[in-house]
Image: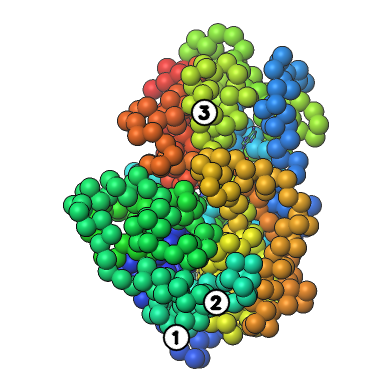
Amino acid sequence: MTKNGGGIGPGDGIARRDFIGGVTGASLMALAVKPAAADAAVPAPQTMPAPDPALYPPIRTGLRGQHPGSFEAAHAARDGAYAGGVDATPTGEHYDLVIVGGGISGLAAAHFYRAALGEDRKILILDNHDDFGGHAKRNEFHADGRTILSYGGTMSIETPFPYSYVSKALLAELGIQPSTYPKYDRSKTTYAGLSRGIYFDKAHFGVDRTVPGYRSRPAAQFFADAPLSAAARADLIRVHDAKVDYLPDLDPVAKAEALKTMSYQDFLLNKVKLTPAALPFFAGQGYRNNMRVDTCPAFNAFRSGAPGFQGMEIAHQIEAEAEHFHWPDGNASVARLLVAKLVPGVFPGAQTQESIVLAPADYGKLDDTANPTRIRLSSIVIRAEHIGKTEPTTEKAVRVVYSRDGKNLEVTGANVILACFNNIIPFIAPEIPPEQKTALAYPSKVPLLYTNVLIRNWQAWKKLGVYMLSCPNGYHQWATLDTAMSIGGYESAASPDQAVVIHMVRNPNQPGLPRKEQNRLGRWDILNTPFETIEKEIRGQLDAMLGAGGFQSKRDILAITVNRWPHGYAYTYDTLGDPAVPDAERPHVIGRKPFGRIAIANADSGGAAFTNVAIDQAHRAVEECLVSRGLT
Ligand SMILES: Cc1cc2nc3c(=O)[nH]c(=O)nc-3n(C[C@H](O)[C@H](O)[C@H](O)COP(=O)(O)OP(=O)(O)OC[C@H]3O[C@@H](n4cnc5c(N)ncnc54)[C@H](O)[C@@H]3O)c2cc1C
């Protein structure tokens, strides 16, 4: 199991927090993968015919995630286009439950509703994207006769707190056993001898250089190879090595409280007395929930394993992490397993945590009139409102209007669950009381690009001695070879001569501004940057980072999929940017109150960006639906 941001250790894969969080002090020296036996067998490549992109969205490349065509009508609703009401053509369809959002939360809500009231209940799931799963998005490539998978969003089952009974029970029902993960993970052998490195870019460090062995080699050795001034080098070695108590007058509890009131940047500059010349090293790196050095409370940086705290005794609660499980397409496999259970005919028969990896999906069956549960994609909901009375016996209680192919269409439901984003809810459900609307408007999701670049081979990485690169100040701040896996007949590249996906993460920020404002501007940035510009940045960055290893983007890039998530991670509170109030007064708690027959699910309503939170919130919302109809 991956421990709190540690790197690859025995049985561990590349974990989500390796590139969004940091590295624990405890695992500093454990990052480099131990060399494997030289004769590790290269598995035979699996073959699967390449599906038609017109019929099978996961294979589409270019701009994915919140792709063009998936959000414009919702933005029109936000901008007041339907303030006077929405005209729509009735479809005549009525459902027991209409769910807005086909992410993990919406799919889980359908599952719980069926479990409570029966599988014959009529359920319609509407989602704005051309694929289901929300953030849990599958990216699929075909090259050299192999199927090559990656994740366009949600990477893993992994949470810094345990899964609830509800979430664990759902995983069990889907046949997912997180404890079995080590048997599928091949990273330790495939990337044997490679380490995490840092890419120092010319604009900030005077020269382009990739240096391997960050926190696996002694700091003095690592920074000796880095393009830094003597003063910056000495200070960075000190921050990483020195065991100094920078708050000597405070006891451990007071230290923790003090660190919650200052940013990591302020801690480094004012307490550690880091030379400002060394700050660019920390500037582009993300700490938990993609907070940056200027917006991350120093306490959170400490909990992420960031350097500087090794000589300090700081009070903190021991976190019991959830078990870690990763599929080649991330938690898209969870979404696919849910769909396999909900909608007959999409996948061939019953699926397991292994078979789902390569199972073909027939998207034509998602919205089949023959099935009680239907999933309708490319359908942007612009209105959910009560039609009249909501007595427990009222059937047609809510009207839902969605925009599809330029038409506004209407269905009715006895219940509606909004499993979408909190920010859009006030605009599509205008009956909600003003205080609740204010609460729903409070969070500011973290904007992200999850970019997958298929390359011909990974010889350059091998030559440079790295499998993962942190790129302070880079356009993308992280780049990593995709987790090596063998599961359900799927074999990822075992040899550096084989094609592999480089997974890159961009989190645009505007240093100096409050975190929510940085998120807002980052959202604007990625929504307004055309694919061509992003592609140019990707090519330039990969050439600069890997050129010394022989990489040439023109020759070596086979495909690019940019998963654009302006509304990415759910907003989480922090001690610098949010008032300290009791949980019951938090905006996500006020915002998620049920309203008549309308209930609210999704990760925002749990105030944390995790799969289990999305599941737990779905369960709560279903309970509220049952209560609203006296069905408990
Ligand atoms: C890049 C990324 C990586 C992540 N990695 C992890 C991870 O490794 N592990 C983890 O536990 N969590 C991770 N998360 C958090 C992730 O958000 C949750 O795990 C979970 O998948 C959220 O599910 P959801 O259903 O609440 O929201 P979403 O996945 O966002 O699904 C909501 C759906 O509703 C749709 N929608 C919104 N408005 C409308 C409308 N008006 N009409 C119709 N549809 C609408 C949305 O577009 C979306 O498809 C990650 C998130 C992101 C963005």
- Residues packed near mark 2 inside 10 Å, few (<14), some (14 to 19) or many (20 plus): many
The amino acid pointed to by label 3 is Leu
Q: CA distance from mark 2 to mark 3?
A: 46 Å
* Label 3: which secondary element: helix
User: Which one is in front in this view, the residue at disc 1 or the one at disc 2?
Assistant: 2
**Image position of 106 (left or right of 617):** right
Tell me where residue 74 appears, x and y as whole percent.
69, 31
**Which callout, 1 or 2, points at the residue further toward the start of the chain?**
1
* Label 2: which secondary element: loop
Tell me where residue 49 appears, x and y as whole percent.
73, 66
At x 61%, y 63%, the residue is: 474
Q: CA distance from mark 1 to mark 3?
A: 50 Å
Q: Is residue 223 above or below residue 472?
A: below
Q: Is residue 504 above or below residue 455?
A: above
At x 56%, y 66%, the residue is: 471
The amino acid pointed to by label 1 is Pro
Mark 1 lies on residue: 35
Q: Are marks 1 and 2 in contact (CB under 8 Å)?
A: no
Q: Quadrant of ligand 1?
A: top right
User: Which one is in front in this view, the residue at disc 2 or the one at disc 3?
Assistant: 2
Mark 2 lies on residue: 227
The amino acid pointed to by label 2 is Pro
Q: Quadrant of residue 167?
A: top left
Can you say which quadrant of the picture contains the C terminus?
top left
Q: Which mark is residue 440?
A: 3
Residue 177 in sight here: no
Residue 551 in sight here: yes
Q: Are marks 2 and 3 in contact (CB under 8 Å)?
A: no
